[in-house]
Each structure stands twice: as C-alpha cells, then as structure tokens.
Image (cartoon, helix red, strand yellow):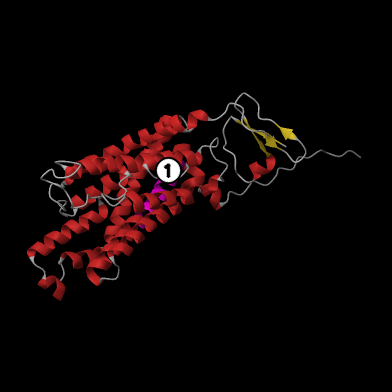
Amino acid sequence: MSTENRTVDSPPRQTSWDDRMVVKNDHARRFIAEFFGTYLFVAFSLGCLSQVIYAIELGGQYSDTSAFFIVCVGEGLGLTLGMYAAYGVSGGHLNPIISMALALKGTLSVVAMLVDWLAQYTAVFLAAWSVYALYYNAEHEFLGDTSSNRSRDMTTEERALNSKIAASIFASQPQNYSDPDGIGIWGTGYRWRVTAPNVILNSALFTMIYVGLIDRKNTTTDLRHVPVLSGVLLAVIGLSIGFNCGTALNPARDFCSRVISSVVGWNFNLNSGVTLWWFLIPVILPHLGAIIGLVLYQLLIGNHFPKIPRAVLGSDNTRPIPDDGTILVFHSAVKRNQTDRTADVKVIS
C-alpha cells in the first residue's frame, strides 16, 4: 500500500496590533522619538516655569529663591524624562546643538541631524502652545483681561509690565541690571557683553560634558544613566550660571516659544533695549558654544587616550585589548546593553 506524500501548509501568521504599528523607515522612527522626547521636555519645563510665575504673581505661594530652585530642578527633571522616552530609538538629543555637535564629531549623519532639528523645532512649537492653552485662564487673570476685581483695579502700567513678565515665561530674557553709563568692568552695553558670553559658556559646558558622558573611551558609566546625568547637568548650569539670562542653550525652545509669544501679542521689551531681535543671542550663539565645547573636549580629553588601553580582566585570565583600536567586551556586558552597536566593538565569550 503506497502512501502519498502530502505537504501541509502552515497556517498564516497572524499580524499583531504591535506589528501593524511598527514604523519601518529609520528617519520616520527617529523623527517620532525626537518629537515625543522634546515635547515632554519642553512641556514640563515651560509648565514648571508658568506655574511658578503665576503662583508668585497671583497667589504669592513661592519666594523668589525657592522659585529659582524649582525652575532649575524642574527643567533638569523634564530633560531626564524626555531623554528616557526617546533614548532607545534616537539617542534622546532633544536639542539642536547636541545633534549638531554629534554630526560634527562624526557619530551622527547630516541627514539624521536635519531630522532631529525638524522634530525638535516642531515639538517645541506644539509644546509651547500646549502650555499656553493649559494656563490660558491664569494668564488672562494675570494680564488683567478678566472681569475680576483684580483686573478692574489694574493700571495700564501694571498690565504692560505683566505682559512683559508673561513673555519671559516662553523666551529667555536678560536681567535688568545693565550699566548704561559704562561704569564697571564691562563698560557700555553691559547687558549684551555679559549675556552673549554667558550663553556661549552655558552651551559649551553642556556640550563638553555631554560628549564626555557618551564617549565610551572616557567613561565606564552605564549609558542608561546618561539621561539622569544630563538632567543633573542642566540643573547645575541653571543653578550656578543661569541667573543672567537663564540657561538659554536650546535654540529650538527659545525661537519657537518667542514666535508664539509674539503671535499672542506679549511685549518683549521686558527691560530697556530687549526686543524681539534679542533672539539672535539665544538662538544663534548656542551653536557656537556647542562647537567650542566639542573642540575643547577633543583637545583636552578626547585626543589623549592611550593607544593600548588597560587590559580587560576576565574571570580566568587576562585578555589585552588589541592595538587596532577595537574594544573587547564580555558577553555579560552585551546582555546589560552596555556596548555601542558599532563596528569597533568585538564580543568575547
């Protein structure tokens, strides 16, 4: 009795909902991740600043000292959360100057940098609108546009001043302690001479330390901790050298928020001589600061690693790292996601 060979077709694989939602284009995935992470960062940052300012002006709930601390810490925590949201897909740069610095360093393509920029500027624009809408009632009460007793008692001068304060929520402004008579070490035009170097210094320090955090040759820190350390770094910059004009190291946040402020009609002349065109400092100069920070890192740190690093010690013997620049890592390290997915990494069991 002969038997007939029959092939049994396997049942078609059912496509799950997760499979249907997968974005296959690399640039599209990158855009979505950077957009989402940047949106979270800016929404938390501007929301924290709005809440503190409106609470002080309308309810007196914070002192000036505590408000400054809350804003700096809140901005740092917002950066940490935003970076964690996007870190696995795009690296969670969330700042045009970081994307530019990594492109100049050669670890990010120019196309990826442009995708980052588009996502970051778009996210900031929508996040600023979201915060504006969320605090719409508080803002109109603060500006005297409601029918409350407080609004009826406000003078024209008070309304104009409050408009300037509201604008400062969404765009960085220099402090009002200029020296128009040229008395002091900075001379005439003090405000411009101190804020421009301050913006460059903030951006240079942030970029220099950030590049050091993600440089595998410079640190053994688990890369999963980079968002936390980046948030701490931003908070420290704000607490230490952010008084003159804020941190002012994210061009996307400053430019898009300033556009929104001008659309709703807020007055930018918070201090004499500060107009809409002040955006040239916090929008353009951070890029210069990032370049300076990257160059300084390479000159002071990045170019001075030994060609033959210390041996990697195994559980049973010692395996020296070869002289061709490759980095040997153990399989356990790969399991902990502590290695970069680059060609210069070889896995040893």
Q: Is residue 23 in view from this perspective?
A: no
Which quadrant holds residue 67? bottom left
Q: In percent of the image, x 18 and y 54: which residue is there?
A: 264
* Part of the protein shown in magenta: 29-44
Percent position of residue 87, x then y:
49, 46
Percent position of residue 164, x then y:
17, 56
Taking the image as shown, residue 159 lies to the left or right of residue 75, namely: left
Q: Which residue is mark 1?
A: 93
The verdict on residue 37 being magenta is yes
The verdict on residue 289 being magenta is no
Residue ranking furthest to the left: 156
Considering only vertical position in the picture, is 102 above or below 168? above
Q: In percent of the image, x 55 and y 40: which residue is there?
A: 219
Residue ranking furthest to the bottom: 149
Give the position of the N terminus as an image quadrant.
top right
> Residue 111 or 64: which is nearer the viewer?
64
Which quadrant holds residue 119? top left
Which quadrant holds residue 166? bottom left
Percent position of residue 267, x then y:
15, 53
Q: Is residue 48 in view from this perspective?
A: yes
Give the position of the C terminus as an image quadrant.
top right
> Residue 4 or 245: which is nearer the viewer?
245
Which amino acid type is marked by label 1?
Answer: His
> Residue 305 or 35: which is nearer the viewer?
305
Specify few, some or many for label 1: CA neighbours under 10 Å numbering under 14, 14-19, or 20 or more: many
Magenta stretch prevailing secondary structure: helix
Considering only vertical position in the picture, is 188 above or below 163? above
Considering only vertical position in the picture, is 1 above or below 59? above
